[in-house]
Amino acid sequence: MRLFAASGDRAKAGQPAVRVTRSVVVAAPRDAVWERVTAPAGINHELRPLLSMQMPVGYRHATIATVPVGEWLGKAPLLLGGVLPIEYDDLRLIEVTQPVRFHERSRMRTASVWEHRRELEALTENLTRVTDQLTVVPRLSITAGVLRAFVGALFEHRHRRLRHHFNTQRKLRLGPEAC
């Protein structure tokens, strides 16, 4: 486990924090899910077709296993429909415990804090629960309601995409009658 104590980037007192938690169970072993959800291709598959995310320069082909923990990695542009830049994620990983969890604490144009914890729980050999906990501190408190709705909908979308990906993979391995 690699751990970094986050300091110097606390939200200002009185800023409303948006908290969203979503879980999904997928038909795959935890190691396979970890490999998928921590690689740029897997992240972008979850986001599409709504968004895509380019990794910061120097980390375009990196995985969570190869990036430094506790360091700012740079700005990752978020592209609406994969083409129009609408936001960025100034990425920093705080903790990585493979293949169990990661904790990202970043900054965005619209949020002074974007905190994302993703945990993978092996329910059986071939079933994994993915839980995402998000805490977002908007730069403008008036946007808290919109951010809560957007983040909730975005992670519901991401979880649908994850479930579909792994269910499709299972059908390919076992045949449609096994699902």
Image (cartoon, helix red, strand yellow):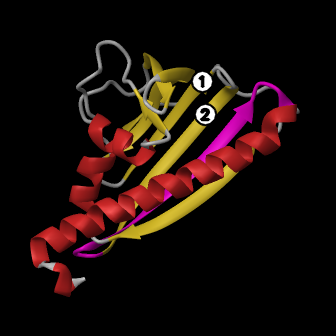
Q: Identify the secondary structure beneath mark 1.
A: strand
Q: Which mark sits nearer the N-terminus, 1 or 2? A: 1
- For this view, does 11 lie left or right of residue 115? right
Report the residue at 40% width, 48% height from top: 46
Please rate how many residues cluster around mark 1, counting C-alpha atoms within 10 Å: few if below 14, some from 14 to 19, many from 20.
Answer: many
Magenta-highlighted residues: 124-141
Q: Amino acid at mark 2?
A: Trp
- In the picture, residue 52 is in which quadrant? top left
Q: Which mark is residue 107?
A: 1
**Residue 97: horizontal and vertical position, in percent?**
34, 46
- In the picture, residue 42 is in which quadrant? top left
Give above or below for 25 relative to 66: below
Q: Which mark is residue 114?
A: 2
Q: Is residue 73 magenta?
A: no
**Residue 101: horizontal and vertical position, in percent?**
39, 50
Q: Is residue 127 magenta?
A: yes
Tally the marks. 2
Report the residue at 54% width, 52% height from top: 155
**Residue 81: horizontal and vertical position, in percent?**
48, 33
Q: Gap between marks 1 and 2, in whole Å? A: 6 Å
Give above or below for 28 relative to 149: below
Quadrant of the drawing holding the N terminus: top left
- Confirm whether residue 13 shows in the render: no
